[in-house]
């Protein structure tokens, strides 16, 4: 390579190609997160038809749910933190050594 000693790319074409690849990686990450949020929302909506329900954690995970992806959270007066995928939320509970999720729908009083 000719030019400066700290030169990284051999040509402007190589530099452009590298930057384009980095941008694609960021977009793919965004698409992955967006896709998982949509899956999580769809599953929470499907399993929570009554407005508040309880489901075994393993059943929701097997359906494709990933609790690491959520859009917002709400903390109640008891200190429980509900994680939400848009308007559908979940709270992990342990009952009889079994992990369960309490599923809820966003309510107006949660805006305060």
Image: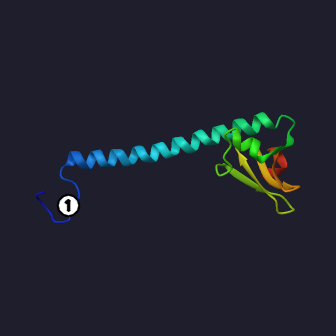
Give coordinates of residue 70: x percent, y percent. Answer: 67, 49
Indicate the quadrant where residue 55 lies.
Answer: top right
Please give left or right for residue 28 compared with residue 73 in the image: left
Crowd rating for badge 1 (residues with CA inside 10 Å; few <14, some 14–19, many 20+): few
Please give left or right for residue 25 compared with residue 77 in the image: left
Give coordinates of residue 79: x percent, y percent. Answer: 82, 63
Residue 3 vertical position relative to residue 52 in the rendered view, above or below: below
Q: Residue furthest bottom?
A: 5
Indicate the quadrant where residue 96 lies.
Answer: bottom right
Secondary-structure class at tag 1? loop
Q: Is residue 23 visible?
A: yes
Q: Quadrant of the N terminus?
A: bottom left
Residue drawn 33% across and 49% down? 19
The residue beneath circle 1 is 7
* Closest to the observer, 68 or 4: 68
Please give left or right for residue 14 compared with residue 25 in the image: left
Residue drawn 46% across and 43% down? 27
Residue drawn 86% across and 42% down? 53
Q: Is residue 87 visible?
A: no
């Amino acid at each position: 390579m000719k030019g400066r000693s700290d030169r990284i790319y051999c040509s402007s074409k190589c530099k452009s190609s590298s930057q384009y690849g980095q941008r694609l990686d960021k977009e793919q990450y965004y698409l992955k997160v967006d896709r998982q949020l949509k899956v999580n929302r769809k599953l929470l909506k499907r399993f929570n038809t009554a407005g508040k329900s309880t489901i075994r954690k393993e059943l929701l995970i097997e359906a494709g749910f990933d609790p690491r992806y959520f859009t917002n959270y709400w903390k109640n007066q008891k200190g429980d933190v509900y994680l939400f995928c848009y308007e559908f939320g979940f709270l992990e509970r342990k009952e009889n050594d079994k992990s369960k999720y309490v599923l809820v729908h966003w309510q107006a009083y949660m805006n305060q």
